[in-house]
Image (spheres, rainbow, N blue to C red):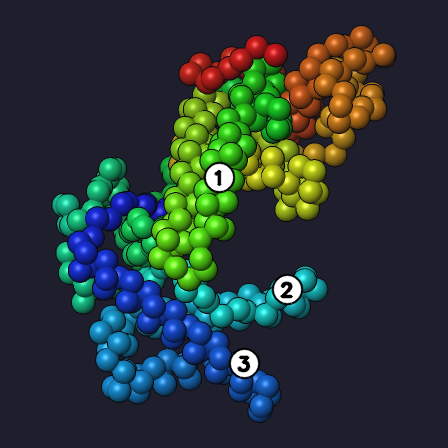
Amino acid sequence: MKRTYLFRLYPTIQQTTTLIQWLTTCRMLYNKGLAERRNQWETHQYSVNYCEQATQLTAAKQTNHFLKAIHSQVLQDVLRRLDKTFKNFFRRIKKGEKVGYPRFKGKNRYDSFTYPQSGFVLEKKKLRLSKIGAINIKLHRSIPAEGVIKTCTIKRDVDHWYACFSVALPDPESQREIQTAIGVDVGLKSLLTLNNGGTIANPRWFRNSEKKLANAQRRKDRKVIGSNNRHKQNKKVAQLHRKIRHQRKDFHHKLSRKLVDSYDLIVYENLQITNMVKSHHVAKSISDAGWGQLMCFTEYKAEEAGTLVEYVSAYNTTQLCSSCGKVVPKTLATRIHSCPYCGLDIARDHNSAITILHRSRYYGESQSQLSSSSGQGLPVEPV
């Protein structure tokens, strides 16, 4: 299995200038390659491939000192990225999906470059990059000794720099025996509702920072377009968005870790989140909650720990009674499930979480061996 390890870089002023120059050159190479592919098709109905552009790159490096200053494999990876973009474009067309033609990258739309094989050496407190030098790096956690580093990607996030290592790790030896299971219903009022009655509060990171963002955006709009003051204020807006993103990511990492450590089977709804955010009524709240990110974090952590994550159908989980199985119609405003057939009276989301767990194939196969736990260590609130 492959995992990505991300570490913060602390380049000097001179190294920062070099990194920005590399990003600019890579972006221009990407745009030039895109323009060539588009023009060749429009004029000659001819599709340019990666090998042809890589051959032209070798000749271009002899006359362009900006290209010559960059590691050769980094430049080749830019052309591979462009080639992959076109392959994905044609693949989606064949599937009948709605897709836009590959776009040129603007000044702030190209923020990373990759050493695909060599050209980097990770030392104790330094990352040595070919043609750049040794950059200070914060190794806040260790890469497993059995892991093999495949690629190194240098990424810019506003004014921060990061190194992303793609590491190949051995597959986990075995899966844990299922002793505890939990059904999880994601929502907006509470981020998670568990089948044992516990809830995880929704932090609403974006909602809580909307006023700060609005004020910062308003100050930016008052600056003269193209001025240094507008550029500085635009940077402050981006830093606020980054802080919200990091808060959400940190919370999801910690929550997913507690779920994986507490349960052997975790059952989610198989939600079509992409379609759900098309509704302008709840799009902002769903994006702020970050259901997809939480599920993704839980899934990859569970793979390492031998825990099982299962996705079940989301059809009618809120309408069915978890006790008798009868359909009890509800509107979104109805927060209590009151079954007229069996008399069950519990919170709507609690009922959904129980139904989600019951739909699990693994829970059904070994129901007699499972015992739902209260989840020690989880931030559980009473319903």
| Residue located 54% across and 80% down the image | 38
Residues at marks 1 and 2, CA–CA distance in whole angstroms: 35 Å
Q: Position of residue 270 (x, y in %)?
A: 64, 38
Q: Which residue is mark 2?
A: 99
- Give the alpha-carbon distance from disc 3 to disc 1, as whole Å: 42 Å
Q: Residues under labels 2 and 3: Cα distance?
A: 16 Å
Q: Position of residue 383 (x, y in %)?
A: 61, 12
Image location of residue 4, percent across then percent down: 36, 47
Q: How many labels sit on residues?
A: 3
Q: Is residue 183 visible?
A: no
* Vertical comparison of 71 with 250: above or below: below
Residue 215 has which mark? Answer: 1
Residue type, mark 2 in image? Val
Residue lying at the far bottom of the rendered structure: 44
**From the viewer's perspective, is 197 left or right of 126?**
right
Please name the amino acid that badge 3 sits on.
Answer: Arg
- Are the residues flagged by discs 2 and 3 in contact, CB closer than 8 Å? no
Find disc 3 in the rendering and name its residue: 38
Q: Is residue 373 left or right of residue 167?
A: right
- Three-letter code for the amino acid on which mark 1 is drawn: Asn
Of residues 12 and 132, the one drawn nearer to the viewer in this rendering: 12
Q: Earlier in the sequence, mark 2 or mark 3?
A: 3
Q: Residue furthest right?
A: 341
Q: Secondary structure at mark 2?
A: loop
**At 21% across and 42% down in the image, what residue appears?**
138
Left or right of residue 89, residue 324 in this image:
right
Secondary structure state at the residue bearing disc 3: helix
